[in-house]
Amino acid sequence: MSLTTLRTGEMNTSLADAVPKGPTLVLEPGGAERNYWRDLWYYRELFVILAWRDIAVRYKQTMIGVAWAVVRPLLTMIVLTVVFSRIAKLPSDGPTPYPLLVLVGMLPWFLFATILGDASNSLVSNANLIGKVYFPRLIVPIASAIVALVDFAVSFVLSLIIMLWVGFLPDLRIVFLPGFIVLAVLASLGPALLITALNVRYRDFRYIVPFIIQFGVYISPVGFSSTVVPTQWRLLYNLNPVVGIIDGFRWCLLGGSTQLYLPGFVLSLGVAVAFLMVGVRYFRRTERTLADLL
């Protein structure tokens, strides 16, 4: 038996073992719907195994591994700084160095983009597992989001190192950062669940996601401060849910004169919640036919 076959067998055994085995199976009308959210906790071990598998694949089967989470934000920071600061001549936010403004803005954006990209193809990648055993399918795209949090942690440490190097330290507002991280994940999961379900039925969506991510960098305040948007348009600009989250990250980490535009943040939060509700609802509605489509 080859080493590849052995490892594949071990992985399949681990996934099979992660599915809880109850002593009795009771079938009743509406039972699966009524117990769905309880089953998410019941299958938590499967969630951990899927998340750990995705992390291992991301960092063990690449040439540069964790270094990619460092190189990508650094190169992006340089490009966006040149485009928006040197060429477009956009101002920074108060005394904040422009590269640092961009670097902090990239933290929530990369988290959003990675969750959207990984989750959108997660069901297709796990088609064999979905077709063989029952478990709440919502586990699969959510587990894929854990990889994005690992990338985020590496980028966050890099940002802190650079902030210490330039002597620009965050103030006490950093204690609110975990809340904004949770908001960033929730804002990402809404469209991610929607596109994940659509990608199973219409495979063309795998080509749309990279375009959304690429286009979103320029319509979101990643490479510039949202304060450059004219006042009469700023509330409308916050219909993009990422805007309020990026502003929140800068408010937590950059301190100083950085202010959080509260009406816009509330609007971004409302849009993010609406996307999450729509995404979960559509995913749940199409979940029972996923195995047939895959």
Image (tube, grey):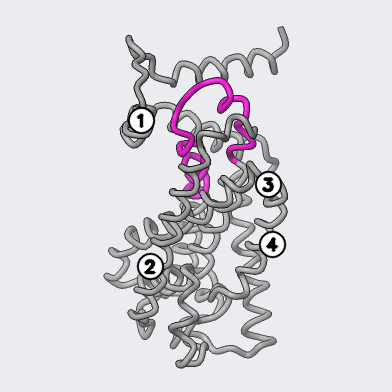
Please name the residue that numbered disc 2 is placed on: 269
Please name the amino acid that badge 1 sits on: Gly
Q: Dot 3 surroundings within 10 Å: few (below 14), some, or many (20 or more)? A: few
User: Circle 2 — which element?
Assistant: helix
Residue nearer the viewer, 35 or 186? 35
Please name the amino acid that badge 3 sits on: Tyr
Q: Nearer the viewer, mark 4 or mark 3?
A: 3
> Is 216 placed above or below 136 here?
below
What is the total number of numbered labels drawn onto the structure image?
4
Prevailing secondary structure class for the magenta stretch in the rendered image: helix
User: Residue shown at 63%/41% (left/top)?
Assistant: 200
Please name the amino acid that badge 2 sits on: Leu
Q: Are marks 2 and 1 in contact (CB under 8 Å)?
A: no
Residue 30's label in the rendered image is 1
Residue stretch rendered in magenta on the structure: 122-150
Q: Nearer the viewer, mark 2 or mark 1?
A: 1
Q: Nearer the viewer, mark 1 or mark 3?
A: 1
Q: CA distance from mark 1 to mark 3?
A: 28 Å
User: Circle 1 — which element?
Assistant: loop
Going from N to C along the chain, the mark reached first, 2 or 1, is: 1
Please name the residue that numbered disc 4 is placed on: 211
